[in-house]
Each structure stands twice: as structure tokens, then as C-alpha cells.
Image (cartoon, rainbow, N blue to C red):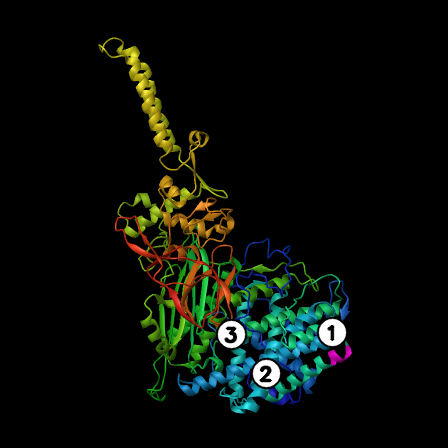
Amino acid sequence: MTDGKPWEETVQVSQKTKGRRFSHKTLDRRATVSSQQTPAHESHSTSHRQPLELKGFKFNLTEDKILEEATLHNNYVYVDKSRLTGLPQFDSISTYDVKDEDHEKLLRLEIKNLIKAAELEGPYLFNSAGRLKLCNAASYEELSALGRRISLDISVIALDNATMVIENRPKGNLVSMAVGSIKHPYVRLRREYIMGEKNRSTDPEPAEVSEASRSLYFALVDFVTGSIARLLIRTASSSYWGSQTLGLLARLAVKLKFLSKSSREYAHSAIRRVEDTIHSFQQSDENRTTIVIQEHVEGKGVEEKHLQMDNDLIPDELYFSEGFVRRGMLHGLFQAAISSLLQDPTRQRTPGDFRHHVVAYETGFNRSLVIVSEDRDGYVTTASAVALTKTCCRALTLVKENIENLHSMERPPSSSVHTDSATESCKISLNWAVKPQDNTKLPGDNMKWPHGLETQRVDSIVSVMVPLALSTPHVASVIEDLVKFSMADSTRKTDEPMRRFKHYPIEASCSVQTSINARMQKNTRKQDPDTVSINHSDLIGKLKAGGKIDSEWIEAITTDGTSNSARPHLPVPLQELARYNKEIEKMEEWVLATTNVTVRCKRFVFFILCFCAIMITGALLLPFFVKNKLPGVDPFQITTFTWLVAGVVLIVAKGRYVKEWPWHDFVHGRVVCESVSDLADVTGVDKQIILMKLLHNERSTALVTRGPYNGMFDRKSEGSSEGFAIDEPVQLSTMLASGFVILKVISYHGEHLICLDARKGNDLDYANSEASVSMKYLSCLEMSNGEAEEFVSRRPNRTSKTVLHLSENSIGWHKMVGLFVGDAVFG
């Protein structure tokens, strides 16, 4: 950890700055992995070689190489070997009368810290050096104030960088992108530092960081940058990836610590500078750039334009593009990590109101991994793209290492530390299971092991909350964009490809919740028995289509090498699993067309044809054997009657399963099914399992569906008589096992259900409780209006359930209640 002394010796405070905040909750619903900011060069592949083994891997991180990337403005080499020097600096502190030599010393200091943190194997814990002790109001308030201060300083840095880009005015769309990034940090800094001073609103104005608190500020910055560095270098490996990312993080840390001396003064300077820059543009230019600047700053809602890398850009413009886009992504990661700790005054939250859950579980028949995260504000994100789930699992592994270490070192407070009734606590829980592949037994982590920890130390909370905030799907999406941007970097291309690390499939859940938040949530849970928190749901290892989500379903195959058929005394869940796997094998042979599903039923057809052939053959031979042995009986009449019987058998057999069964299909032993009921009758597969297959794999098929219960399908037929009929409601467990996440929300119009789509083929989806913003969701707006359809099951128990019909609706809400687990079916 860097303390404040080297900074005091080398830095003299001066007068200018700027700021901006990249919101970690700003994303397009159902976005692809590549954001609009990132140039999508799909021709680049991650690697044609086998993935690397992370355990024991030696990271090639050298101080000189990282410093070279951190001081790229001094020596920027383009792909054609042209060299540029003396370029403007991103994250600069030279404008505050800091000499370049002193800046380089500070960079080297931060680089050493980052290398040490990044290469550390095992836990990486936060240490406040005794400044933050027990979980009480004073510690929570100090932590929240520092987190808020760091978040504001990130806004100052981002505004600085955007202003620098606009002042240098490179060509292309980068100016529009820089202008678009100004609005949020500009408005935020004005509200915090200018409007707050004038109006003295109820929002507490952030206090300046005292000299005594600067060491804690430095420690928190070091921990967040170190946590980000550890995750980034474990995401991919190349000769330039680690140096690039650590160089950017080092510059960010240097400027943050510099701004901590007088954040308010630097924020005022940043605001003045961006206003002067815009004014000079308005005075000097009447081109499109001026119009874009005016429209964005005045809030006229012009759509933001994003950078598209092309071959027409000259090297210095590529320098601006590369630096601005990468820093924007890193600022987003930093804001996501730090916002988990700070108090948001606009939501009137109590300091210490912390809650964060992340769950990784499997869906579908191919055990596709889904990541679901939920924070204290009810912001839920889901991801099913392989690249995103791997990054989330990598981050969860770092969380796991910290929790394991905290579990072993956590001790009750000593007698020297005073505890009273005002001391709060925090519960940290982790459930972990590494999934074996190809029936290979993995050492140590192939079984679930719940870890529970209750702590009264703020340091322990920070040690888990920060890396846990980096394990969300949105953060993984930003990291994936950052990796792709480096892979597509045409400015300084190398022959070495980016390589990824080997990934072991896991199922896991991690939860952090303070006692303050638990008390606030308690009443809500009591009042609504139809919902649970995501971390309390049985998503891991218990999702079976058509079953109860709290049943003891076993989703793991034993690894002792013995087949199920060789073990007649298997427990009931394993017998059910064997039947389940057998049904999966049946479905692999199905052919899904646009409006129907073709399945093979050769055994049935063969049996019917053989039965009829035997009858007819016997009837034909009967006259020759009987002859005149039966007086008054014409044997040929028996033959004729047998032909009639065979014809009736064939007609009944052809009408047994489907309404129309052409002779061509019948003779070839296949049947074309046009509804779920027909498909279940022909194959014997449970209807809910059929529905799970159709839902989970919808994006990889061309099947078009029709009602009455097809609300959750994307492709619906325009006519009522066309398409594959979904004539069976979908149970809750089937929806979850298919990849949907069903949430109950409250708006000003009542209670609603919304569905997040984490099925295979849909990378990222999210739900944010913003009552003023309406977004389209698959939802049920009328849950209890007395007009809901009642569905009576045809199973032996003939249970009656409410059918909740789903459709695409624009909806906004102000409260997320939780994961819906009510007794209902969907249509």
C-alpha cells in the first residue's frame, strides 16, 4: 500500500482539473458482448492454441515495459514504424506544476504496487491499518464518504480526458464521443460542488479528505486498482495485454491520489475548463462538431456517436482514440467496484446498507452456465454468453480465495476492542462446486462446500465486496470489450495472439449482506411469500423442468465410473436422473422445422406393419390349410374379413398420434408433430421437458409457434392456424431451467412480473428499478385481477394453477421485490 509521504515530497498542488463518471448501470438491454464503443473485428480470434493453465502461470510483468505503456505519449510507435513524441497526456498532472520526472517517480511507485498485487497467488485483502475497525455507524460513514470522494474524483479525471480530446480536436467521430461523455460527469460535479454550495440541499456535501484520511484513501485506491489488475491479467495473456492494463491503472492511481489533496478545488477547475472549451468551440466553429457539442451539453437528446476505427485515421488520432476508449472502460470498472461501498444520498440509504448477490448455475440440457447478480438497489443483470460467464467465474474464484482466508483468520473481537449494541455485523456466504468434465475427478473442488462467515470488521467487508462487484455480468461485458479492443488494436499490432486461460465449469453462489440491510429486507420478505432473494433461491443443482424448485433434484452424475444400469439400488433422485438423461437422448434425433417437429417412431410402425402382415399372410394361407374342413364356412370370406381388420388397424394406428399422418411418412417410420401434446404422445417425453428444449434452444432453430401458451417465445406466427402449437402452460421450474429469470416488481400501477432472458444465444440482459424510465420486457402486468385463467392439470392429482400470460410491454417500476417462486404456470 502506498502511503501519503512520497506524494507530499514530490507533488505541489496547483489549480486545474476536470471530471466525469462512467455509470456502471448504463447499458442496452439484451446487448451483445461487443459494445458500441468497441470496434468489432471478428476476424481476430483469441487463439488457435490450447488455453493456458492459470495455476502456476508466470506473468510476464516488467516495470520498464509497463512504464513504457504508461508514458506512451513520449514514444508512440505506429504499425508502419513511424514514431510520435510529445503528445498530450491522458490522466495528466503536469498541468498542476508537477514535473515529468516527479510524475515518472510516482508512476514507478504505483507500477511496483500493481505488479506485486497482480502476481500475488492466493488471497488479496484490504487493510485499513486499523483506521476502520468494527462495523458501526462511524466506520460505515467514513468508508462511504471516501468511496463517494473517489467516485467523484474519477469523474474529474474522465472530464479532464474528454476536455483534452476536444481541445486537440482529432478528426472522425471521436470528438462526438468525447462530447457525449461530458454530460454525466459535468452535471454530477455541478450538483455536488456548485449547486450544493448554493442551496445547501439535504444531500450531505462530500467533505474534503483530511490528512489523517488520505492514507485510508490511498489504501482504498490501491485495493481497488489491485483487484482490477488481478482480474484483468487472469482474463487473458499476451506480451502487451498486462503491460497495457497495468500502465493505464498506474496513471489512474497517480492522478486519483493527487486529486485527493484538494478535490473540491480541482472539480471547480474542471467545470470551468470544460465550459471554456465549449464556449471557444461555439465561437470558432460553425460546423457539425459545434452543433453536437451544444446539443449534448444542453441535453437535447442527440444520439451518441461512437468510435469506428478505420484506416484513414492518422497516428496521432489513433493515439487519442486508443487512450480515450480504453480509459473509459477502465473508469467503468473502477466505478462499478467503488459504488458497491458508497452511500447514494439520492436513495436515502443508511450508511452500512450493503447487499450483493452473485449466482452461477446451469440451465438447459447442455448445462449452459448462467450468471445472475443483484445489488442493494434491486439492479439485476444476467449473462449466458460463454465469454462473459468465464470472466465472471474467474472473478468469483478471486472472491472465493479471499473468503477462505477470512474464514480461517476471523476471530471474535478481543477484549481490548470495545463492542456495544451499536456494533453491526455482516454475513458472508459462499457455495461452490467445480463441475468435472469427461468424468474426470478434479482435485479438491469437485464437491459443494458451503462457507458461512459473520464478521464485525469493515476490512473483511471491503475485501469481499470489491471483487464481488467485479464478478457481475456487466463488468464482464466491459472486460470483454477491453480485451477485444486490444486484440483489434491496429496501431501497434504484434504477431502474438491473445491467449485465454483454461476454465473449469462451476456452480456457485456468493452473498454479502450487512445486518442493517437484513433488517430492512425482513419485513418485505414476510409480506410477500411468493418471492425470495436470489441468494436464497434453489437455482444451483436443483433446476428440473416440470419439478419444484425446492425439490432434492440431483443435477450431477456420479464419477465412480459405474453405469446407472449396473446399479439397481440407486437412490430415487438418481433413478429419476437416469430417466431424464434417456429422454434427452431421444430429443437429439428430433428435426425442428418452421412449423413442426419430425420424430422417428420406427418401432411403432414396424410393429403395426408386422402385425398386419402376419394377419394378412395367415388369412391368405388359411384357405389352403382349412379347405373343406369347416362345413358351411368359406375360408376366403375369413381372408376378406382379415383384410378389413388389417385396414382398420392401420387407420387406427395412423390416427393414434396426429391428425394427419401421410403414408409416405408412415412407411418411413416418422411422424410430423404440430403441437406439444402430439410430441409428448409420440415420444413419451414429459411435456415440460419438451418445452424446456424448445425454449432453451429457440435461437438456434427456425421454429415458429402459436398459442394459446406461447407468450414466452420470440417467434410467433401471424395466423392462428400456422406454427407449432404450444398447448401446454410452462411451469415455473421449466422457465428457470430454460434460462429465464422471473422477477416481481412494484410500480405505481401495482405488482408485475418481468422476465430476464438468459437463454443460450442471448448475451446480456438487465433490470433496473427506474420508475421514470419505461423499457420493454417480457412481462405479466395483470397478476391478480380476477380474470386470470385457471389451468387444471391432467395429471393424476389434477391440481389447479393460475396461468399468467406473458407479453412484451413497456414498463417502469420503483421497487424490485425479488425472484418469483409463486405457484403459477405461464402462457
Q: Name the secondary structure under disc 3.
A: helix
Specify the amino acid type for callout 1: Arg
Q: 10 Å neighbourhood of mark 1: few (<14), some, or many (≥20)? A: some
**What number is the disc on residue 169?**
1
Front-most of residues 664 and 129 = 664
Specify the amino acid type for callout 2: Leu
Specify the amino acid type for callout 3: Ala
**How many circles with numbers are drawn on the protein?**
3
- 3D distance between C-alphas at marks 1 and 2: 24 Å
Farthest left residue?
A: 631
Front-most of residues 631 and 343 = 631
Quarter in which the C terminus is drawn:
bottom left
- 3D distance between C-alphas at marks 3 and 1: 32 Å
Asked whether, in this view, residue 443 is left or right of residue 182, the answer is: left
Q: Residue 87 appears at what percent x and percent y?
A: 74, 75
Q: 10 Å neighbourhood of mark 2: few (<14), some, or many (≥20)? A: many
Ranked by sequence position, the earlier of labels 3 and 2 is 2
Residue wearing tag 3: 337
Which residues lie in the magenta part? 280-284
